[in-house]
Image (cartoon, grey):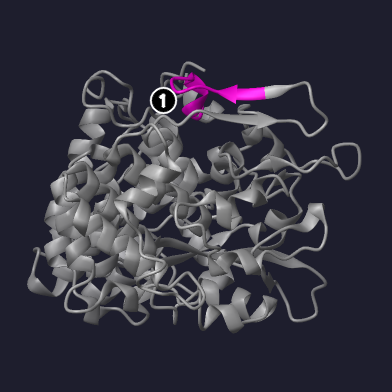
């Protein structure tokens, strides 16, 4: 019987094909036998990022996805329906699914590991150090995304026994070998090790287009997400402070209540995921049709879900500017124009091609939210209030720093019966949910904080409920991985 390492080995081989045939990647081909210069290693690292899109299934599993009621009309896309119902998806060749994303992450990890091997052979000289830093942080990122989706969320009480995912730290050149899932605690320890070693080595001036790579800002931003999951709140704050050095936080945020507010549908669509947008700290291209499908999916932003944008449904009682950018006209096409499809044709005269989107993996707003929540957990409420004021100053049209100031009292009034800590965290999550509609970030908070959710059918009767400890919060491993030896998740 085949070994589990064949999965990872095949992912390594697929890295070559990925860089060679996907023209939109615009990366140099992977020629591992010639990885003998710092330049070639740096070029290889363009493939050290997952070119798969997690947003479609993360968004569908969350409470941002409502039933639009057209089940008897248009054919329902399985990549949207299965995660909404918390059903296993099995086709690893189908983009926008968990198995496809699993493979994309291990392909990225294999590229990082080959780069690290080449750096070791090259003598770990100073000329390689920036690439070494990028490779370590990129490897940590892909493993973190895998353990987040395919394992239980980090819990200090159970992490040492909860099954993790294989943490691969060396190039896989043969199909022989042994792999195990390890534990969540072990995976987190490896991620932290790679982060701590990698971040100090990164040099932003080595990148031609920095937003497509782990700059120091992007690396620190990733660290805030990792440590928020790990509940190491002091480190969340430390890394967030490193993202915003010498500048006001507000200057780093998307100007929704000014520049964005004046944009039309296609103008906003063109800017949101652009590398010129300062709030985008790390973006990557992904093979996905998300740019059109997210507006048409049956289980997505519905008129019922849209109510979260109503002024009465947030602690400040004021509408955020993003609420005026919900387009669609009818229930079936509600969307905020954040993404657009790019089509790459095999030839100029071809009548069809491949879809890809630019995906913001890390943004300044997430860093702010992470720091605000961490400060609340540390008992530093004034700092959290200051961050939320900075956020709202870029989100409310005609913002008034007095009348619209965020306060503990407003948070507690909006969440009656809660103590101040829970009310503040609840308020932060309220604004964060609006901010990241269509981006999958809501799912991270749902699993991290064990938030119960329901998926009711619009026709009534049936309701899909996801409790705080429901095993379906953990996505099943790909069938190939289970068949080749990895322990499957209990669902």
Residue 466's quadrant in the figure?
top right
Q: How far across and down, in percent of the image, does residue 192 sit?
A: 18, 45
In the image, residue 346 above or below residue 267: above
Mark 1 residue crowding within 10 angstroms, few (<14) / some (14–19) / many (20+):
some
Left or right: 83, with 422 as reference point: right
Magenta-highlighted residues: 464-476
- Whether residue 106 is visible here, answered yes or no, is no
Does the stretch in magenta take in 153?
no
Q: Secondary structure at mark 1?
A: loop
Q: Nearer the viewer, residue 406 or 290?
A: 406
Q: How many marks?
A: 1
In the image, residue 170 above or below residue 354: above
Residue 77's quadrant in the figure?
top right
Q: How far across and down, in percent of the image, does residue 244 sit?
A: 23, 71
Q: Nearer the viewer, residue 24 or 296?
A: 296
Which residue matches tag 1? 3
Kindly give the residue lying farthest to the right in the view shown: 73
Q: How far across and down, in percent of the image, does residue 145 sit?
A: 39, 44
Left or right: 86, with 224 as reference point: right
Q: Residue at x 52, y 62 (%)?
A: 318
Does the stretch in magenta take in 467?
yes
Q: How far across and down, in percent of the image, does residue 211 sit?
A: 37, 73
Q: Residue at x 57, y 66 (%)?
A: 322
Q: Residue at x 61, y 41 (%)?
A: 60
- Whether residue 19 is visible here, answered yes or no, is yes
Left or right: 161, with 72 as reference point: left
Left or right: 261, with 78 as reference point: left
Residue 126's quadrant in the figure?
bottom left
In the image, residue 112 above or below residue 82: below
């Amino acid at each position: 019987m085949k070994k589990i390492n064949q999965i990872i080995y095949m992912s390594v081989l697929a890295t070559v094909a990925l860089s060679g045939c996907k023209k939109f990647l615009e990366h140099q081909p992977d020629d591992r036998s010639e990885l003998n210069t710092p330049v070639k290693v740096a070029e290889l690292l363009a493939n050290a990022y997952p070119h798969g899109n997690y947003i479609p299934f993360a968004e569908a599993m969350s409470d941002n996805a409502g039933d639009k009621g057209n089940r008897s009309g248009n054919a329902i896309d399985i990549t949207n329906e299965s995660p909404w119902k918390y059903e296993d998806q099995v086709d690893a060749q189908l983009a926008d699914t968990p198995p496809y994303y699993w493979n994309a992450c291990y392909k990225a990890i294999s590229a990082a590991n080959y780069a690290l091997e080449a750096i070791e052979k090259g003598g770990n000289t100073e000329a390689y150090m920036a690439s070494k830093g990028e490779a370590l942080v990129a490897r940590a990122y892909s493993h973190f995304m895998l353990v987040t989706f395919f394992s239980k969320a980090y819990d200090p009480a159970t992490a040492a026994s909860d099954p993790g995912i294989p943490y691969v730290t060396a190039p896989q050149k043969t199909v022989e070998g042994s792999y195990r899932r390890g534990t969540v605690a072990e995976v987190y320890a490896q991620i932290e090790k790679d982060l701590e070693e990698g971040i100090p080595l990164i040099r932003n001036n080595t990148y031609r287009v920095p937003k497509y790579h782990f700059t120091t800002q992007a690396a620190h931003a990733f660290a805030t997400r990792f440590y928020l999951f790990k509940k190491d709140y002091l480190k969340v704050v430390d890394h967030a402070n490193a993202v915003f050095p010498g500048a006001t936080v507000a200057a780093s945020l998307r100007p929704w209540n000014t520049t964005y507010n004046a944009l039309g549908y296609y103008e906003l669509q063109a800017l949101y995921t652009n590398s010129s947008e300062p709030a985008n700290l790390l973006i990557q291209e992904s093979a996905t049709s998300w740019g059109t499908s997210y507006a048409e999916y049956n289980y997505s932003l519905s008129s019922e879900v849209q109510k979260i944008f109503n002024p009465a449904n947030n602690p400040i009682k004021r509408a955020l500017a993003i609420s005026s950018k919900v387009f669609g006209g009818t229930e079936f096409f509600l969307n905020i124009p954040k993404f657009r499809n790019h089509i790459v044709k095999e030839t100029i005269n071809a009548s069809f091609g491949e879809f890809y989107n630019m995906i913001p993996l890390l943004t300044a707003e997430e860093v702010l939210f992470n720091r605000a929540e961490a400060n609340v957990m540390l008992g530093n409420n004034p700092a959290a209030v200051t961050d939320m004021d900075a956020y709202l100053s870029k989100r409310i049209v005609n913002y008034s720093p007095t009348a619209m100031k965020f306060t503990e009292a407003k948070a507690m009034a909006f969440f009656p019966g809660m103590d101040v800590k829970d009310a503040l965290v609840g308020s932060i999550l309220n604004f964060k949910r609006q901010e990241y509609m269509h981006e999958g970030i809501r799912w991270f908070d749902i699993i991290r904080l064990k938030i119960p959710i329901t998926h009711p059918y619009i026709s009534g009767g049936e309701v899909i409920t996801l409790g705080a400890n429901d095993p379906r919060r953990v996505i099943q491993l790909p069938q190939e991985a289970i068949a080749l030896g990895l322990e499957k998740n209990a669902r």
